[in-house]
Image (spheres, grey):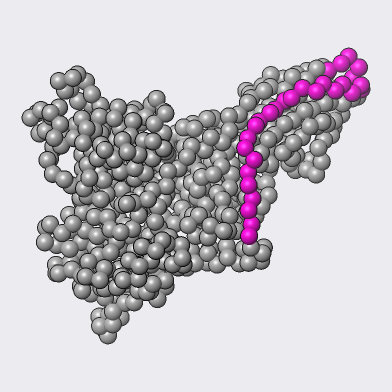
Amino acid sequence: MAWWKIQGTPDAYEDEDEDVDLEYGEEEEEEEEEEEPSYSDKKPAGTKVLFREREEIADMGQNLYRELISNTSNQGQTDRIRQNYEKSKTLFVDQQFPAESSSLIKDPTLADFHTQRLWRSFVWKRAEEIFKQPIKVFNNIDPNDIQQGSLGDCYFLSTLSAIAEFPKRIEQLFDTQDYQPSGCYTVNICDMGVWTDYVVDDYFPCTADGKIAFSGPHIESGISELWVLLLEKAWAKRFGSYWAIDAGFTEDSLRDLTGGPCETVFNEDEEMWDKIYNANREDWIITAASSGEEGNGDAVNEMGLVTLHAYAVIDAQEVRSKRGNETILQIRNPWGSQEWQGDWSDQSDLWTPELKKKLGWSNSDDGTFWMAFDDFARYFSSVTICRIHDSYHYEAFHHSQKEGQFAVYKVTLSQPGQTYFITTQMDSRRFAEEDGYEYSPVRIIVGKVNPKKPGNKGCKLQYISGLANAYQRDVWSVADLEAGTYLVYVEIDWLNELTDQYGFSVYSASPIKLEDVTFQEKNFLQDIYTYNLAKQDSQPRSIGEGISFYTSTHYGAKDDGKFMEGFLFDCIRNKSRNTIIELEIMHKSFDNMELLAPFEGGDSYKVKLKPGEKAVVVKKQISLVEETSVVISMRKKIIPI
């Protein structure tokens, strides 16, 4: 039985957009207090669990980061090892991930008695001791090459099966397709957003009778292929043991083996079929999670499916059957067996000779089958779509961001095209359960730099998109962009002190130049939340002749269920010719909010504006997962000059 984590919907937040409605009295210097909620957002309280001393936690995070950085510098190591073998015939032994019990499981007490007993019987053997020659990394890559073993990593294997529909996408993860007598191989994994080389040897866990213990190849061509074993071993090395990769989410493995951003679509989504069908036409990668709801397990099993299991979605077609127009899916079980037994199964009478020929029907128990989409939506809870583009450009680096700080990246695109901006936090598998590690809320805001032209009085930054998201490792924003220069604001509101590291990547149809310009762009928020933007998002209120006050719950564009960035701003502009405005805004309620520089440190602010001047005041929602409310009042004074 394979275990697969079902990822629940982050039913985090439904934002309530309530415009500020302030009323002002006749007397200009009199304080008028109108207790009206200008913003209210109900969200579940977040948790913060720390079990270790701060110093130990900080050291652990830094050690994990140093380990990650050391892996990125493995380029060239493989060549040196292979050259050494040519001279001394010394086989490579990976000391970082040795062929011993600690690489199977760090703490055996985490496993049940049966697993402990079984795994204690495993022995490590080199590839040449397991397989007969010829041996290759890969020969003809096929989804049916994969055979799951006694490890519950079906999420990972279904990912491999789906990627293997496009063999080049598997090949580019290796530096060679040939068997290496030195026993040294390099696997490329997108680790925390940055492509990283993992060097592994060819020792693999085997059962007492010499068979592969975990995932292995189907050997039907007479050629033994190592690509499945090597990828699984590199994945295990990344997280410290094979046990550490048991159960997981396909959106993580898809992202890390392709670099493409992923989205999960649940079966409640009325557009689920359209998203699957369009993704298939784009040659994107799709996986599916079978249902495991209470009371539904027996029904799933009776139909030939496995509960709480990950499958690869290989094809999506609209066909004409004797019942009329139908939508059907081709799916693969990474076990290589156990297939769907309902309509459109191998034995179904819905298959006509024409459809069999067109869709490559096969009556074999190989784990690959077709089923109607209506049945799919009944027995599967979700699909994960990886938006991989083989021709896209990719740039990334790791970043350290302390609590309360932010980063600004300068992205230059030489051509127009679709562009993704992605943040990736350190994977939760790197931490013990008792550490209480959680993925932290992320804010991303994208603005285009407007070139300065003579007489151009427009704002410096044109707002493009923004979002805020919690509880996910990877958070991304996408937009169709013109050629030009863009600034991307990233802020992570850390929920714990285990790490302050993350990866930032840009994935685009255009060539990319990526720079960190945080120190040059300290006023990013004030620049992007300008008068021009305020004018678009809310109605101005006159607080004197030629003097306008805007207040806005500013949210970015909502796309594919992503959440908003959680900033408010006020904009005051004095367009009068002969008056000065002194304005004080007091927040009678300011729960889970703070004023940003230069007004930080309190719950009120004052501005004094001469004719032609304006001020932008930015307010930040401190936590994206806690209740927020704002009630404001105003005191103003108009001074003739």
- Across and down, in percent, residue 480 comes to 44, 34
Q: Residue at x 25, y 65 (%)?
A: 212
Residue 624 is left or right of residue 192, and the answer is: right
Q: Residue at x 34, y 51 (%)?
A: 2
- How many dots with numbers? 0
Q: Nearer the viewer, residue 202 or 506?
A: 202
Q: Going by the picture, which residue comes out furthest to the bottom? A: 88
Q: Going by the picture, which residue comes out furthest to the top? A: 26
Q: Going by the picture, which residue comes out furthest to the left? A: 353
Q: Nearer the viewer, residue 31 or 570?
A: 31
Per the rendered image, the range of residues in magenta is 24-51
Residue 485 is left or right of residue 538, and the answer is: left
Asked whether residue 127 is drawn in magenta, I would say no
- Across and down, in percent, residue 587 comes to 80, 32
The image quarter in which residue 302 lies? top left
Q: Nearer the viewer, residue 191 or 589?
A: 589
* Vertical relation: 172 (above or below) 121: above
- Across and down, in percent, residue 201 comes to 32, 71
Q: Residue at x 42, y 71 (%)?
A: 102
Q: Nearer the viewer, residue 296 or 451?
A: 296
Asked whether residue 31 is drawn in magenta, I would say yes
- Most common SS among magenta residues: loop
* Vertical relation: 549 (above or below) 58: above
Q: Residue at x 22, y 32 (%)?
A: 342
